[in-house]
Image (cartoon, grey):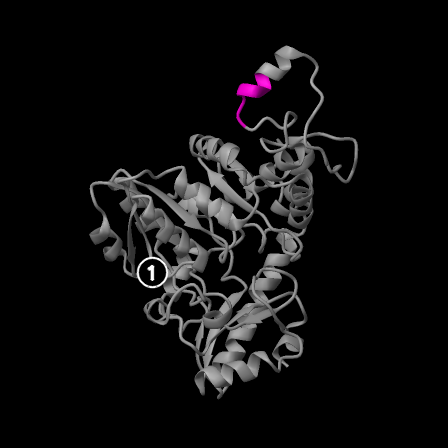
Amino acid sequence: MATKQNLQTRLIHIPNEAFPSKSVSPPIFQTSTFRLDGAEEGREFGVAVAPNQFYSRLGNPNNTQVEAVLKELEGGEAAMVVASGMAAVSIALISNIHKGEHIVAQKTHYTSSLSLMELLQEYGVEITLVDQTDTSAFERAIQPNTKVVYTESPSNPIMALTDLRATAALAHANGAIAITDNTFASSFNQQPLSLGYDMVIHSATKYLNGHADVTAGVLVGKQELIDKAWTYLRVLGGCSHPFESWLLRRGLQTYGLRLPVHNSNALKVAQFLEAHSAVRKVYYPGLPSHPQHELAKQQMTGGFGGMLSFELHGGFDAGVKLISSTKVCVLAVSLGGMETLICHPASMVHTHQNEDQRDEAGISSGLIRLSVGLENVQDIID
């Protein structure tokens, strides 16, 4: 009897199974359109969902290959790759909400996700933002017209956790679906679909690609939800282009090798910072001092991730001095690549929220965010 192959083996061989080729390195189908064998084939492709050899805005063999990998990583029925993480967030929400309906979300989300929800309110969608660490707050926020519970765990940038199993159950008990952004945790460390979620989204720009050379997003979940999302992608046009999908597939070949190093390095850096006299507080779910460490152990079963944030004694001025004087850490936004990136969220990332909104989300003016990379960990610390 054949045994189930290791994840790392599957990452390398799934693409060719999804769209076979004699080329060891799959080709880039850098074309906008495809030859048809006849009118009947054109008719079939014209009514199909995500045809991969018809017109590249609708689908492409490179998309098919990478989607097969992404589906397996999250354990979903289907996956859809799109142009960016925000394309994934937008399509996931817009395809499941209408005017007069209600979304329960968190006070702390990626800044552009919060901006999207403000925009949705202009189109008649009701939004309630709650403290993600309080499951009862989600329950109190549910209304008869609630259609989506939208979460992000750990959250950007303070690494607060949402109880995924509890919030999924709460959504379903009230006739809503549960969607979560799994970018910070990664599918290697956390499997929201197995905890009851209906759809998972990622900025594939980050850990999934892992090389800081692609902008892409992905939705994974139930087939019917992905098919519905594709109908919105078809008209909104946020498709992933062939070369980006090819690069993402290439990056995923080393995913199972990269993520354990991110996890290990970040834990060591967090432990170093927690013991340093200049550091006031460290936010990392892998530390026993994290207020939700027990929850992290329950739902982040693969590891605690490569992201952390911390506050220095001395606040804003001390933070600016630090980010201007590091040697290995690169001053840049984004995350999940091989390089360790350092940034100041209040001035570099969450600029679209006012000071009161940042304070409510726990984002102080002195907070520093670190995306721990794959360098030698002692070099990062030094």
Q: Position of residue 13 (x, y in %)?
A: 68, 39
- Name the quarter where the C terminus is drawn: bottom right
Task: Judge whether 273 appears above or below 195 on screen.
Answer: below
Q: Depth check: 234 or 153 in front?
A: 234
Instruction: Judge whether residue 4 can be spotted in this image.
Output: no
Residue 372 lies in the magenta stretch: no
- Above-or-below relation of 273 to 177: below
Asked if 289 appears above or below 78 in the picture, the reply is below
**Image location (x, y in percent) of residue 259:** 59, 58
Q: Residue at x 65, y 77 (%)?
A: 378
Query: Toward the viewer: 34 or 106?
Result: 34
| Picture quadrant of residue 53 | top right
Give the residues in magenta.
44-49
Count of all numbered marks drawn on residues in the image = 1
Q: Which residue is mark 1?
A: 107
Residue flagged by tag 1: what amino acid is it? Lys
Residue 293 in which image quadrant: bottom left
Q: Main secondary structure of the magenta part?
A: helix
In the picture, the quarter occupied by the N terminus is top right
Camera sees residue 184: yes
Image spot of residue 164 (x, y percent)? 36, 51
Q: Nearer the viewer, residue 323 or 31?
A: 31
For the point 67% across and 39% down, the residue is 242
